[in-house]
Image (spheres, rainbow, N blue to C red):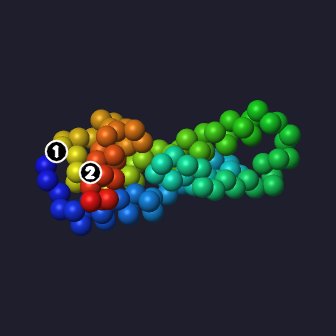
Amino acid sequence: MTAEPDSIRAAYRAFAEIQGSAESEDRFVAAIVGYDHDLRELWLDPRALRDRDAASLAARVLRTVQAATEDADRRAFGVAQPFLPPGTGFADVDLAFDPVLAEVERRARQ
């Protein structure tokens, strides 16, 4: 599979712009995560702090960040899909660690 250098550079730029987002069921917690799984934003509605149950709030935050991470991964897969072997599905790759990103980065720097 051969890709044009310009399309690889465009994909690399697109990866940098990917943001996954999620909101908790009660809409008191929201998170934005980059394709690199870096937590970029975390928003807490002041009402989330009213019940004073730290464990419950922590669990909500964790679930929301995990959902935002999966959203970012799905968006990144959409960008990477043209560079993957035909028939490769979302569950077949780990875009955070697969060599695909390393190869895209290497080619983008050429």
User: Looking at the figure, which quarter contains the C terminus?
Assistant: bottom left
Q: Nearer the viewer, residue 58 or 106?
A: 106
Amino acid type of disc 1?
A: Pro
Q: Nearer the viewer, residue 11 or 61?
A: 11
- Label 1 crowding class (10 Å Cα cut-off): few <14, some 14-19, many 20+? few
Residue under the point 55% across and 49% down = 38
Numbered marks: total = 2
| Residue 19, image x, y percentages | 49, 57
Q: Is residue 92 visible?
A: yes
Mark before the other along the chain sequence, 1 or 2: 2
| Residue 45, image x, y percentages | 75, 55
Q: Is residue 31 left or right of residue 19?
A: right
Which residue reaches farthest top? 55
Residue placed under numbered mark 1 in the picture:
86
Residue placed under numbered mark 2 in the picture:
81
Amino acid type of disc 2?
A: Gln
Residue under the point 67% across and 40% down = 60
Q: Is 70 placed above or below 34 here?
A: above
Residue under the point 26% across and 51% down = 81
Q: Mark 2: which secondary structure?
A: helix
Q: Is residue 104 left or right of residue 36?
A: left
Residue under the point 40% across and 57% down = 15
| Residue 46, image x, y percentages | 81, 55
| Residue 66, image x, y percentages | 55, 41
Q: Mark 1: which secondary structure?
A: loop
